[in-house]
Amino acid sequence: MNKGLSEDQTDALQELANIGMGQAGDSLARIWKEFVHLSIPKIAIVDASRLPALIHGFVGDTAVSASRQAFHGGFRGEVLVVVSAKDRNGLANLMGYEGQLDSVEREEVLLDIVNLLGGACVGGIAQQVNAEIGFSAPSLIGEDIDPLDVIHPDQLAIDKALSLEVCFQVENRSLTAHLVILLPNNEVGALAELLDQFLCTL
Amino acid sequence: MPVSVLIVDDSPIARKMMRRSLPPDWDITIQEAVDGAQAIDIYRKGGVELMFLDLTMPNIDGYGVLEILQAEGLNCIVIVVSADVQPQARARVLAMGAIAFIPKPVNPEGLQEVLRQYGILV
């Protein structure tokens, strides 16, 4: 399906991401005090040039908010979380914020989300392939921005990216968060090696 | 007489991980299903004694499988094996007839303990 990972490696990564996202769902459920329905994570390696269109495809013609967090260690890269602007207030309410949020609180919500989802997903994958990994502080990409402006491929030193799409739904409302994991080209190889070592244990 | 086991998971890697977690010297026969619909087909043919069931799957998820099994008399032991580790998920599947909930990744020792606890492994 892609030049970066074999079918077996992709299957393994999908299952490891699934386990990581299950842990993220549990964390969200404890914070939100609601049962969280998890979708099956969809994973793909895509050309970096396609990332703006990919994010647009996730959310459609709507403004989005996005945050990012870098990770380093056994493999390194960056995880982005994109939520549509219409879901942002719902997320804030679930995380205990009430009323009209100021800009600092809105940013806190987005940083909390990338910390939680990125940490669970990338951290979960790393843990299962026995890789040590650390995270930098999360930062905001933007609020109410055009989905085509979340990522500018010409500003990235990468050719490929790992896209992971996952939906969280709580009763009576649908909140969707999209994760994109950016891996520099040589890091796809590092991850592939770690996945091979994991596959050898099966 | 070997125990007839059905592993239900859409992920081929998860099915391999499940196989690897089973006691190595256990006298069993193993079938696999790639989604809930296939699991129901195999179950209806009869003979399945123990089902390891994932929850998040296409074409009938684990909850849907449990609903159908209950409606049809639940004639096998079901152990849910899932990455969805929310306490509500565990409570829900136990209320739907599963005897146990095992979180992914499966811990082989924990699995053996559950199998012994319910007299499935002696």
Image (cartoon, coloured by chain):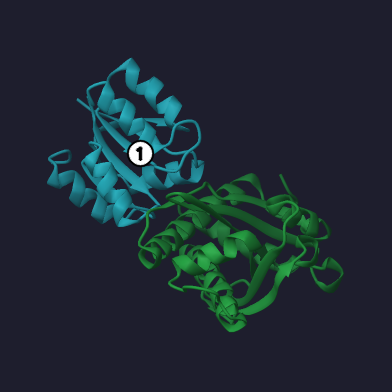
Picture coordinates of residue B110 (x, y %)? 24, 55
Can you say whether B28 is above or below A158 in the image? above
Which quadrant holds residue B22? top left
Q: Residue furthest right?
A: A154
Residue A109 makes an appearance in the image:
yes
Please give the residue where the numbered disc 1 appears in the rendered image. B53
Using residue B101 as the reference point, say whether residue A12 is left or right of it: right
Picture coordinates of residue B9 (x, y %)? 44, 39
> Which chain is indicated by disc 1?
B
Picture coordinates of residue B90 (x, y %)? 28, 50
Can you say whether B29 is above or below B115 in the image? above
Q: The residue under label 1 is which amino acid type?
A: Leu
Nearest to the observer: residue A132 or residue B101: B101
Q: Which chain is cyan?
A: B
Nearest to the observer: residue A202 or residue A174: A174
Q: Residue at x 40, y 20 (%)?
A: B41
Using residue B35 as the reference point, say whether residue A108 is left or right of it: right
| Image quadrant occupied by the N terminus of chain A | top right
Specify few, some or many for label 1: CA neighbours under 10 Å numbering under 14, 14-19, or 20 or more: many
Q: Residue at x 43, y 64 (%)?
A: A28
Residue A123 makes an appearance in the image:
no
Which quadrant holds residue B70? top left
Picture coordinates of residue A51 (x, y %)? 77, 59
Q: Secondary structure at mark 1?
A: strand
Q: Colour of chain A?
A: green
Q: Residue at x 75, y 61 (%)?
A: A147
